[in-house]
Image (cartoon, grey):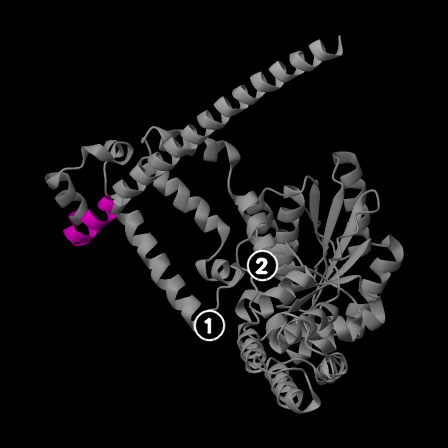
Amino acid sequence: MFDSLSDKLQDIIAKTAGQKELTQDNMQEALREIRRALLEADVNLRVVKAFISNIKDKAEGENVLSGVNPSQQLVKIVHDELIELLGKTVSPLDFSGHPNLIMMLGLQGSGKTTSSAKLAVKLKKEGRNPLMVACDVYRPAAITQLRTLGQQIGVEVYSEDSKDVQSIIQNAVNYAKDKGFNTLILDTAGRLQIDTDMMAELLLIDRVFHPAEKLLVIDSMTGQEAVNVAENFDAQLSITGLVLTKLDGDSRGGAALSVVYCTHKPIKLTGTGEKLNALEDFYPERMATRILGMGDIVSLVERAQEVFDEKTAKEMEKKMAKAEFSFNDFLKMQSQMKMFGSMEQLLGMIPGLKMSKDDRQKISHEGEKQVKRIEVMIQSMTPEEREHPELMNSSRKKRIAQGAGVPIHELNVFINQFEQMRKMMKGFSDVKKNIGSMMGKMGQAGAKLTAHQMMKNMRRFR
């Protein structure tokens, strides 16, 4: 996401290094390049003009601060303007109402039904009890698709064999109150294009049920058309926020930079992958930081907290301490790392890692290919061999290599690296214990010294 724009902006900013101050002359070329980069990223022309004008006003004539070069100042200015453009602050979902209603809007093909399911997964993870309501009574496969997704994620779907959408929603509200559901996700009907009948139905739902959220789902791959769709929906329904899908597939990202400015409505959620857990809250500051190649360590840590199970981590730590870490444990670690996201996404979040999209893709592809080969090698072992790596001998290795379809030297390399990793883990554990023991003794000595000093002072005051 934003890879093309990100690379160009970073190159433009780097060219300003070495200047004494940001002047009209040395800024002219940079602004021209930024303008071209934004237009190539499919950013709306109105947005580009406003963005460039704001940067120019802030940058021209600024004196270089002590210890700060012009390129660093330009990064700060562009960073601040990107945050402004993307909506300034995070906009959380409104959960008012009993039950709370979230109305999902959008054209056909925008990812509305899938986003409804992704939202249900997210809300369920956050402790809410969502119910998805099938309100698209026109597209024959829509209800079936929603039911299938509901089964996959373990979320109930309310549907009726009826064309009366208003009645369906009212019955769903009553059902939710009886069964204890606190959030209803209304998967409304989409069209190939905005029409009068579609808007009339949506306006009726809005006026009768007053949903707390009216979220417009936009396919970020549609580029300039995303702005037109957003403006039309907002003009008639006054949407509360936007959900941008397929951000992982759009290297330009123009839609994300345009829709907020043109509608004055925030991006609330973004779809960053095909998996049903790939829906995230949108943070303008974090996105601006990533666009400028400064990484996103906060999102990286948050994702780690979601993925890694604390209990499993403690069990792994105990095994490492005793050098009992097995091939099965290695597979568990690999499985959790997959839940973390693609290697390419992770590389994009690491601060200070200057790497082009092509390089990230190449490293990611090679790394993921190697992981798959390792998995095949481990799966070619017997259950006993997986649990007890020390059983490995030449005949076992030969059999495993043949079963995995890899050269014997490749298997040997992996096993040697695995053994080195076990020793290193054991070494880290021993160091940790020694430091803990040393700190404990120092603490005891300190406590004795403090007690001795206290007794001495008490005797002095007698």
- Which residue is painted at 28% across and 53% down in the image? 373
Residue at x-position 44% and y-position 31% = 435
42 over 273 or under it: above or below: below
User: Gap in Å between the C-alphas at discs 2 and 1?
Assistant: 16 Å
| Magenta stretch encompasses residue 2 | no
Judge whether residue 193 can be spotted in this image: no
Image coords of residue 406 (percent x, y)? 19, 54
| Residue picked out by circle 1 | 356
356 relative position to 196: left or right: left
Q: Dot 2 lies on which element?
A: loop
Left or right, 307 with respect to 425, comes to right
Tell me: 294 left or right of 357. right
SS at mark 1 in the image: loop
Q: Is the magenta region chiefly helix, strand or loop?
A: helix
Q: Residue at x 53, y 46 (%)?
A: 304
* Image quarter hosting the N terminus: bottom right
Query: Could you say which quadrant of the image residue 24 lies in?
Result: bottom right
Amino acid carrying mark 2 in the image: Asp
Marks 2 and 1: CB-CB under 8 Å? no
Badge 1, how many Cα within 10 Å: few under 14, some, many 20+? some
In the displayed structure, does residue 144 sit left or right of residue 410?
Answer: right
Please give the residue where the numbered disc 2 appears in the rendered image. Answer: 296
Tag shown at residue 246: none
Magenta stretch: give its range: 402-416
